[in-house]
Image: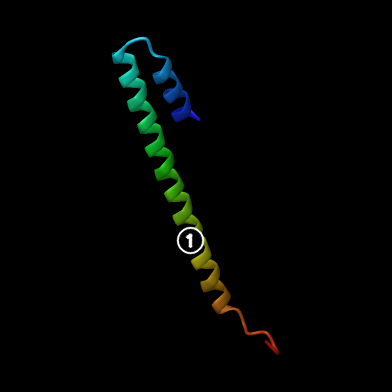
Amino acid sequence: MRAETCARSAAEAQDDYHRKNFQQLAVMWTEMADKAEGRIAQRDVDDAIETIRRAGQLPARNGG
């Protein structure tokens, strides 16, 4: 949302100085969001691996 707001502000800016600043902010917010998504994905992978490890410690079910 912040990246979109900055991009919109850049498009509406009346001068190059503000346009460039808002464009840079939009890029920064986009990069931060991408990094956050990567951390969340890694956390999900770690949780799945831990679940598999715990499942391996459970006794096998009879008949399957």
| Quadrant hosting residue 21 | top left
Is 52 drawn above or below residue 25 in the view shown? below
Q: Nearer the viewer, residue 48 or 11?
A: 11
- Residues 56 and 31: in front is 31
Colour mode of the rendering: rainbow
Vertical arrangement, residue 55 with respect to residue 46, above or below: below
Taking depth in this image into account, of 36 and 6 the one nearest to the observer is: 6
Instruction: Name the residue at 41% across, 43% down.
Output: 34
Image position, residue 12 (x, y; %): 43, 15
What residue appears at the point 37 percent right and 9 percent down from the top-left corner? 14
**Quadrant of the image for the C terminus?**
bottom right
Q: Residue at x 47, y 61 (%)?
A: 46
Residue labelled with disc 1: 45
Query: Would you say 47 lies left or right of 17 here?
Result: right
Question: Which amino acid lies under the numbered mark 1 shown in the image of this protein?
Answer: Val
Q: In this picture, is 45 found above or below 39?
A: below
In which image quadrant can residue 10 be found? Answer: top left
Can you give x and y, in whole percent of width and height, for residue 62 in the image? Answer: 70, 88
Residue 52 placement, left or right of 16: right
Element under label 1? Answer: helix
| Residue at 36%, 26% in the rendered image | 25
Q: Nearer the viewer, residue 22 or 53?
A: 22
Please provide percent x and percent y for residue 42: 44, 56
Looking at the image, the residue that sits furthest to the bottom is 63
**Crowding near pointer 1: few (<14 within 10 Å), some, many (20+)?**
few
